[in-house]
Amino acid sequence: MTPITVRVDGAAYTDDVEPRTLLVHYLREQLGKVGTVVGCDTSNCGACTVHLDGEAVKSCTVLAVQADGCEVTTIEGVARGAVLHPVQKAFHEMHGLQCGYCTPGMIMASIDLLKDNPDPSEDEVREGIEGNLCRCTGYQNIVRAVQHAAAEMRGDTSASNGHSGNGHVRPAVVDTAAAPHVAVQA
């Protein structure tokens, strides 16, 4: 066993861990941070994304001993009490999830993206989350959610942030080129 000391979501922990324990398993099994999900254990899906010293990492690729002395933020640590982080709120408002399995990692990757790029284009959002897989949504509402959160975080209250001007969120535009089987109703 190897002793580690780590701050997770603002709280300090000192534990003994097996040197081969992955950070994702330490977070879930020893600390009970089950919002960080195990998707693939091969670093392909991004569902286990957390912030390690402020940078997004796939926690299935980091050993718990490598996090010794570090600050880890999980999906449970991004809200402030009952107040959701703007990205969490936008995912809810813009329907940026379906089954929800990828959502914690998507949100963590999106927060990291917006830290470096507070006004990303659609292509920049897609590039910023490309290491995170979603098998349900087709990504359109995820992209909208990230851009909506970016606008809110910048304080942009213009119509470009997904609102119609009366406080209501505009519905997503149906991309019939990507989904020709969808009938657009007027």
Image (tube, helix red, strand yellow):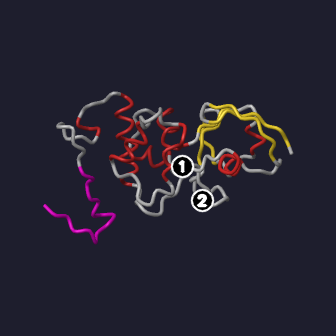
Q: Nearer the viewer, residue 83 or 137?
A: 83
The answer to whether residue 152 shows anywhere in this view is: yes
Quarter of the C terminus within the rendering = bottom left
Amino acid type, residue under disc 1 in the picture? Gly
Mark 2 closeness class: few <14, some 14–19, many ≥20 residues within 10 Å: some
Percent x, y of residue 64: 74, 44
Q: Is residue 156 above or below residue 135?
A: above
Q: Which residues are magenta?
A: 171-186
Amino acid type, residue under disc 2 in the picture? Gly
Circle 1 sits on which residue? 105
**Which disc number belongs to residue 39?**
2
Percent x, y of residue 78: 51, 36
State how many labels appear.
Answer: 2
The answer to whether residue 61 shows anywhere in this view is: no
Verify CB contact (< 8 Å) between mark 2 and mark 1. yes
Q: Is residue 175 above or below residue 9?
A: below
Instruction: Write the residue at 46% across / 56% down.
Output: 100
Task: Tell which residue pokes out farthest to the right in this image.
Answer: 1
Task: Tell which residue pokes out farthest to the bottom in this image.
Answer: 181
| Magenta residues, dominant SS class | loop
Percent x, y of residue 168: 21, 42
